[in-house]
Image: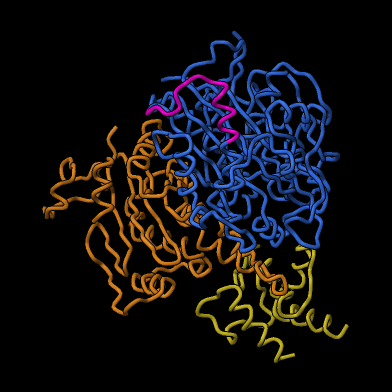
Amino acid sequence: MKTFIQHFVHIHAQKVLIDGVLRYEETATALDFPAFIRNVYKHFEMQYPKFYKMDDLSKLAFVGAELLNLKKSDVYKSEDKGIVLMNRSSSLYTDALHQASIADKNNYFPSPAVFVYTLPNIAIGELCIRHQISGENYFFVQEHFNPAMLTNYVSLLFRQKHIQQCICGWVELNADNYELFLYSVEQNSENAVKIVDKSPIFASLNLEVDHILNDTDNIKKLYKL
Amino acid sequence: MEDLKLKLKEQIIEALNLEGMSPAEIDDAAPMFGEGLGLDSIDALELIVLLEKNYSIRIEDPKDGRAIFESINTMAAYIQSKQIA
Amino acid sequence: MKSAYIIAHHLISALGFTSKKNVEQLMANQSGIRLSDRYSKGLELPLALIDKTAFPFEYKKEYTYLENLMIHSMEESLHQASFDYKSERCLCIISTTKGNIDLLSNEKDLDIPKERAGLGNMAEVIQKYFQFYHAPMVISNACISGSMAVITAQRMIQEDMYDNIIVCGGDIASEFVVAGFNCLKAISHQACKPFDAHRTGISMGEAVATVLMSHEKMPSEKISFEMLGGAISNDANHISGPSRTGEGLTLAIQKTFEMTALNASDIDYVSAHGTATIYNDEMESMAMYRTALDKVPVNSFKGYIGHTLGAAGVIEIVMGIECMRANMLIKSLGYEENGVEHPLHIIQENATKAQTHFLKLSSGFGGCNAALIIQKQEA
């Protein structure tokens, strides 16, 4: 069964790319992640007060998913939509904050609002609430981005009819770095991004009438964009 | 009492990450949950920690929080009653 | 489409270091929960801890506590089967929420680098130990991780992606999780009481559980267990509070029924998630009511082994299987009086009942839910 990439978003090194096109670049040097992601949120005029309550991993996933432009092509029932995410550091960045709050026995105040984010799939929960997604949801943790595992499993979910649309990708955040590569996949190509730009990177993709097939090779190439 | 309320609002804004909100925008009598500030169950637990951390007041049963955290007025009155006692 | 069978398993929990010991304790209604202040200095809380003084294996210093348990459990499982686990046709799936979380605490000594707190890092260490062909797939999806791992394994075997899959679920008790759940006011000060009117929260547990899943049955066994299918859903409602209407879990159950072409009247027994928090049990009973499962015998194993997080699905599936093998319904420990809006058929005393299908339910933070059905087949 063929599935197609609707849109894809990259966020890393103070840059935001949508469908491979640079759409935002932070000019201030070495801005910390919270300040950077807040700027992106404001730049794209996002409106979701709960954003400010999320931990950094969820903020990254949230902003990435907003930029996928899901509204435009949203014809699926909530239960037919899924999310499959992957990263390296799970929720360890937030875990460290929680651990720090219990390190000193004389100043022992673990925070409920921090603790609830000490699971990577909370980011999925946030996206499910925002985009009303109630189908299959997975968080895989791998030492390195594993496009084969991701693509093979997402394809299985489509083949076995568990889902008809899916948000997928790599959402990594740790103390030193952040890297998001998020994409949406669906069975129909109608809403899929069209590749008219034939620059070398796009020219090497497996396309079907200008649409990007969701396969391991393509995902590997798009990730590196 | 007014000083306490102002301090409380500042602490709440910080603890609950109420981005872009100033103490002046929080009405003393408005409900904090549901409509009003739109707080939820995690916020309620966070307010329990706030009371313990800043005022050494312990609330064991989160259900007790409902009446205490109804508004800034009720919360300030509760803190004051505990501090006098 | 191929079938997926659970052909072997091994359990480590507060009830003991083998599947056999765990099942014996269940049948005798013995709980592994004891009061302890090990992870909450100055405050005694009920915990279901593995007996660290009684390891039936040599503790390997170059591996963490959790890795030692996982390695032992996987080795003991693999001894029971004869497939080539180093083959390209074999995959290992690890389900865990926090992995080596104890490495974050400064009190830990150690020769083990902190990077091992990374779940992928830990998985590769385990891969190297067993010389698995593939890097293990790590599923970290809160408290449904274990059930998801079993569902995932079944789907991949079904599609012939692998012949054999080793599913290992594990999570350890730690100050990290105890302090966390305690600040959520979600920990009971007495042994947990799932679905009871006086329940006040969970009891933390720790466990490692392994199941071997295969495309073929064990030739020597008269009774086999086929994993028929399952589904995963999300409440899309709140990140920590379960849905009041049981919507998400209801959806997972309905999809599972659809997929397996079974319905509530085919289910002989339900192993509930039953954490004993006010909200989980209310939500779960609502979902069971909505799917006509409220008359089917149900229990929660949490009163025996506590809440074992990422291991919960795997260990409770094994317990469910063994109860089905023995045609036994095991008393839901801690339950005395109905405490939910839609009363369930809670198993109050051990009883015998012929069983063919059992349904496992799981729900977790992030709004996730899972349901799956296992079928007993007699040759």
Coordinates of residue A221 in the picture (x, y in percent): 23, 49
Quadrant location, the C terminus of chain C:
top right
Does residue C237 appear left or right of residue A193 in this picture?
A: right
Q: Colour of chain C?
A: blue
Give the side of residue A140 with respect to residue C16, left or right.
left
Residue sticking out furthest to the right: B85
Looking at the image, residue C265 lies above or below residue C289: above
Which of the image's four quarters has the N terminus of chain C? top left
Residue at image position (40%, 56%) is A171
Is residue C76 one of those drawn in magenta?
Answer: yes
| Percent coordinates x, y for residue A181 in the rendering | 33, 55
Quadrant housing residue B29: bottom right
| A83 falls in the magenta region | no
Chain A's shade in the image? Answer: orange
Instruction: Please give left or right for residue A32 compared with residue A7 in the image.
Output: right
Residue A99 in view: yes
| Residue at 63 percent of width and 41 percent of height | C59
Is residue B77 shown above or below A19?
A: below
Magenta region, residue range: C72-88
Residue at 68% x, 18% y: name it: C325
Percent x, y for residue B35?
61, 69
Q: Nearer the viewer, residue C146 or C14?
A: C14
Q: Confirm whether residue C312 shows in the render.
A: no
Instruction: Give the number of callouts.
Output: 0
Above or below residue A68? Residue A45 is below
Chain that is coloured yellow in the picture:
B
Q: Which residue is located at x 49 percent, y 22 percent?
A: C214
Display coloring:
by chain
* Residue that sits furthest to the top in the current view: C379
* Whether residue C303 is situated above or below residue C324 in the rendered picture: below
